[in-house]
Image (cartoon, rainbow, N blue to C red):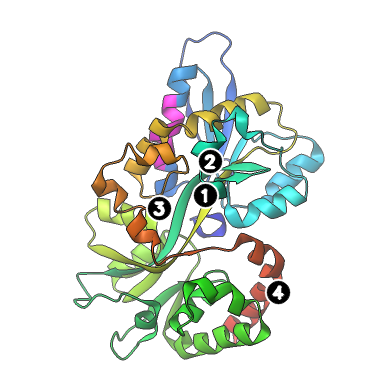
Amino acid sequence: MKLFFKPVLAGAALSVASMGMAHAAALTLVNFGGANGAAQKVAYIEPFAKETGDSVTVVEFNGELAKIKAMVEAKRVSWDVVEVDGGDIGRACEEGLLEKIDVSKLGNKADFLPSAIHECGLGAFVWSTVLAYDADKLKVAPKTWADFWNVKKFPGKRAMKKGAEYTLEFALLADGVAPKDVYTVLGTKAGVDRAFKKLDELKPYIQWWEAGAQPPQFLVAGDVVMSTAFNGRIDAAQREGKNLKVSWIGSIYTLDFWVIPKGTPNKALAEKFISFASKPEAQKNYASHISYGPVNNNALKLLDAQTLAKLPTSAANAKEALQLNLAFWTDRGEELEQRFTAWAAK
């Protein structure tokens, strides 16, 4: 999601077109690339182009809202559908950078997860940040964030995302705060101090990561014994034969959203694509290629037990998970990120 996938060269694009169709339209879709982008290509982009005859050009980015802002303000919008991190949609919507969404044009509102419906977007998928480790190197499996902090039982480096979001929540979970109480505690000065004090304990053992591809790379190379990681990145490594495993206890899940930049001349085509990508069959195909959960509840009925077991939205995996509080980070994110940056630099 946003800043943590490997950046790509500006203008890198993939074009998927159905040839020979009269009056075909052209859609520009922007996503984060990587394993997620590959799954979208197979499940959404190629089938959409084949069914409609419309061409789709895919541009990869790393979540820079500034690019959308510049387009909207210049009234030269060339992006039609953009995948944004759940933490960004509220701010982008408030700033008037996005078209308002009429869910009835995209599907049956009752079919979608309530958290997938936003005035400026529709959920694309559910994903989690989890505790990951290499089972070839750790014979005893770490299960909780307390284990992640236990350097005596599990000697070695740990990798964590370089930022306050997720990191502060994991620190409080490691310190014994129940998932349901994390944001109540983090909403107080004492709670923030408590989180940073817990991070102080682990700081000498932390190797920071900033791109989603890094945690599995660090684990396989033996640079760290465990890491926070996007569950889809670990799933992709598992599909490549790597013996990486995850613990879902205390994982934090959230959504990415499809949004339409304000002023695109292709709004109707953008809605057409989002509607296509939100259908049960398309979401079933997507979840079969990467372990991110569908937002259309009917898609879950189409998935086999083995696939469901790897999804953040399965009952077993969600049981002890925490939903990222987007409103909290919209309100408090700037100040907490500033404190984190100063703390990390010491």
Task: Name the disc covering residue 12, or none.
Answer: 2
Query: Looking at the image, is mark 3 or mark 1 earlier in the sequence?
Result: 1
Please state, as top left, top right, bottom left or bottom right, where the C terminus lies in the image: bottom right
Foreground label between 3 and 4: 3
Q: Position of residue 73 (x, y in %)?
A: 80, 42
**Can residue 286 be seen at all in this image of the molecule?**
no
Q: Which residue has dot 3 on it?
A: 313
- The Cα–Cα distance between marks 3 and 2, rounded to whole angstroms, is 32 Å
- The Cα–Cα distance between marks 1 and 2, rounded to whole angstroms, is 7 Å
Q: Position of residue 84 (x, y in %)?
A: 59, 48
Q: Are marks 1 and 2 in contact (CB under 8 Å)?
A: yes
> What's the residue type where badge 2 is placed?
Ala
Q: Which residue has dot 4 on it?
A: 335
Who is closer to the viewer here, 24 or 47?
A: 47
Foreground label between 2 and 4: 4
Secondary structure of the residue carrying numbered label 3 = loop
Q: Which residues are magenta?
A: 38-47
Q: Are marks 3 and 2 in contact (CB under 8 Å)?
A: no
Task: Indicate whether residue 39 is drawn in magenta.
Answer: yes
